[in-house]
Image: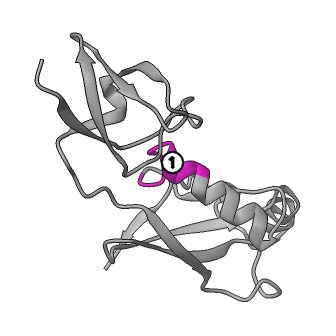
């Protein structure tokens, strides 16, 4: 087989072998998987689900910022920027802030369904950064955020 180039689109459980956005050379190929030389310098079989054919520009999280004051709101708006310039938006809160949100007497309806709500342990930058990075590496950040024009 001619060695085919594939680009990693998510890392799944292969964090030791893959980097999102990195181009790998497939040294073998079967119907549903490639054998690549991973970041750990070992040959490993990985499902094709984690790759795009060829050298592809994969959007990767490059930065994020709070759009709201942490003191004024329980559900905090966050803008996320990717390496290709696209931006996405989501809400972030903690379990404690969610409880406070539902204590509002004027809340109508007394529920919500927000797919772009991310619940983190704390509102500190490190926890949010780690959470967003994990979602990005797993190819889940698009599901957890909305496109921002």
Between 66 and 16, which is closer to the camera in this rendering? Answer: 16
Q: Position of residue 52 (x, y in %)?
A: 24, 39
Q: Position of residue 66 (x, y in %)?
A: 64, 82
Tell me: residue 144, above or below residue 81: above
Q: Is residue 141 magenta?
A: yes
Neighbours of disc 1 within 10 Å: few (<14), some (14-19), many (20+): many
Q: Name the residue carrying label 1.
A: 137
SS category of the residue bearing label 1: helix
Q: Which residues are magenta?
A: 134-142
Q: Position of residue 103 (x, y in %)?
A: 86, 65
108 to the left or right of 3: right
Q: Residue at x 48, y 38 (%)?
A: 18
Quadrant of the rendered structure where residue 48 is?
top left
Quadrant of the rendered structure where residue 73 is?
bottom right
Quadrant of the rendered structure where residue 86 is?
bottom left
Between 63 and 119, which is closer to the camera in this rendering? Answer: 63
* Residue ranking furthest to the left: 2
Q: Residue at x 21, y 52 (%)?
A: 56
Between 2 and 49, which is closer to the camera in this rendering? Answer: 2
- Confirm whether residue 93 shows in the render: no
Q: Residue at x 31, y 56 (%)?
A: 58
* Residue ranking furthest to the front: 41
Check the picture and name the quadrant holding the N terminus. top left
Q: Is residue 116 magenta?
A: no
Q: Position of residue 67 (x, y in %)?
A: 60, 86
């Amino acid at each position: 087989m001619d060695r085919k180039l594939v680009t990693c689109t998510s890392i799944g459980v292969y964090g030791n072998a893959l980097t999102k956005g990195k181009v790998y050379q497939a040294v073998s190929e079967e119907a549903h998987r490639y054998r690549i030389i991973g970041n750990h310098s070992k040959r490993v079989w990985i499902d094709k689900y984690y790759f795009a054919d060829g050298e592809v520009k994969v959007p990767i999280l490059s930065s994020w910022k709070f759009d709201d004051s942490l003191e004024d709101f329980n559900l905090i708006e966050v803008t996320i920027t990717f390496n290709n310039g696209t931006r996405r938006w989501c809400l972030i809160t903690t379990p404690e802030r969610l409880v406070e949100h539902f204590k509002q007497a004027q809340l109508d309806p007394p529920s919500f369904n927000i797919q772009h709500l991310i619940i983190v342990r704390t509102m500190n930058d490190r926890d949010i950064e780690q959470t967003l990075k994990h979602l990005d590496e797993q190819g889940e950040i698009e599901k957890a955020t909305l496109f921002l024009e």
